[in-house]
Image (cartoon, rainbow, N blue to C red):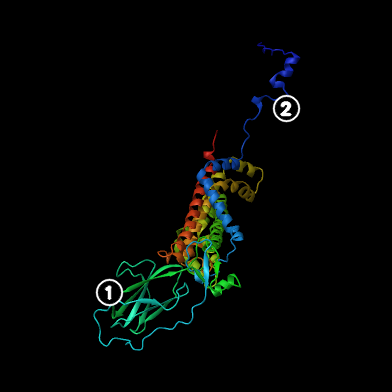
Amino acid sequence: MEMTPALPRMHEREVGTHPDFLPAGRRTAAQVISRPSLTYWEDAWLRLKRNRQALASLGIVSALLLLTLVGPLFWRVDPAAQELNRISESPSFGVRARVIEEPGTYEELTRSDWPESPAAPERALEIPRAIGLLDEPSILAVRLRWEPVEGAAGYVIYRSDRAPEGAGSYGVPVGEVLGGNRLSYEDRFNLSPGEYYYTIVAKNGMEADRGITRKVVLEPGISLADAQLLRADARVGEILSLPSHPLGTDYLGRDLLARLMAGARISLFIGILAPLLWTFTGVLLGGFAGYAGGRVDGVLMRVTDLVMALPFLLFMILFKVVLGGGPGESGIVPMLLSMVVLSWTGPARLARGQVLQLRESEFIQASRLLGASPAWLLFRHLLPNTLGVILVSLTFSIPSAIFTEAFLSFIGMGVVPPTPSWGSMCNDGIQRFLTYPHEFLFPAVFISVTVLAFNLLGDGLRDALDPKMRSVS
């Protein structure tokens, strides 16, 4: 019979100091856990912080939310307030302007001793000999006068912000005077501080080859009525500090920064709430279809295929037309409903695929044997385990919704004016892009940066939440 070798006997003093017999509070360094275990979400957050692009994108998204929610508390400017004397103004800080009086009644200058139309057509017309001013020019009105031209039946007035270099470069025709004896013109069209070059060209059936040009310099100014809105005791000739517009004003004199903040509330509201609603709807339907299987799964998936087959943009526009959004309405609710009705199919298919993979897992079988109900299994085990994939899908859906809202508003089928949104602001700004590019560039930059930030954040979340990419170090 084989005997088990006896363990070496230890002295009582040796037993008390041996590592295997030490009390729990006196463990050696080898027995101390050197690295605590991390939960799934803690590990995902650590890996997300290592992704610099995703972290920067998260900062941009947070800054946009702060601008939207907290910005109006500091920048207390009404986005609907109009300053008609500061239309389409470039970004400005601390502008000082002189208070000017409203021009008096304009009386057209005519010559009774000069014929209104020539007795016989003239082939060649002379250049007007001089251009003068009826009174002091200002941003409220510029009143021009000139000498008559023999044989002229009228005159065309051109305006440019740069010196003409010859015929054909006189700028935009701002007015026309019919009658050779009518020798003055009043310009009130969209004047702002700066240099203007007015050119007068005589005409008689056809315009003359050349005209005479005069340079007019307009200083910053504000009408007395508008100045008294800023300060009740304002007087003509006084210098006032005008409100700053860091991003300029639009074609109605409204502050662009205030409108961008208001537009961000609309664009981000639609861009975040709509994906939340359609993702929630799709996850519920897809999870139920994947767990139920059989005929229920077949019917729900055929409905999903039918909705996916619909032309997205066409039916979204049809929904928008049917649900309304007329004068005085914002158009937000019809757009939200149309997005949710047409966009839930992606999350539904994604959730169904995840549930199909998990419903036969060991922990699901164990819960079923323990008597768990189908609702408990679906909402307690199956759907929570698809949360990482659904969250990534939601992050990618947000920029898509923002871009869709901006596109529909840009073509006039989204948010209805006067409610501001980034898309409708781009639609207003592109009409004056060549002369006032800031009206289009600022909302376009906001749209681009927001969409890019959410896309990069989605990439980072996808890498951080993928269990296969968890670090083993």
Under tag 2, what secondary structure?
Answer: helix
Q: Amino acid at mark 1?
A: Asp
| Along the line of sight, the residue nearer the viewer: 245 or 378 | 245
Q: Amino acid at mark 2?
A: Gly
Quarter of the image with the C terminus in it: top right
Left/right placement of residue 199 relative to residue 192 reads: left
Residue 30: percent from the left, percent from the top?
64, 25
Residue 58: percent from the left, percent from the top?
54, 49
Q: Kindly identify the residue that appears in the image at 37 percent across and 66 percent down.
A: 162
Left/right placement of residue 296 relative to residue 441 reads: right
Between tags 2 and 1, which lies in front?
1
Residue 6, placed above or below residue 44 = above
Residue hosting label 2: 25
Residue 461: percent from the left, percent from the top?
53, 46
Q: Kindly identify the residue that appears in the image at 42 percent across and 64 percent down.
A: 433
Label 2–label 1 contact, CB within 8 A: no
Residue 309: percent from the left, percent from the top?
45, 59
Residue 417, placed above or below residue 279 = below
| Along the line of sight, the residue nearer the viewer: 60 or 154 | 154
Q: Which mark is residue 209?
A: 1
- Please tell me which of labels 2 and 1 falls first in the chain: 2
The answer, for residue 377, to whether it is visible in the render is yes
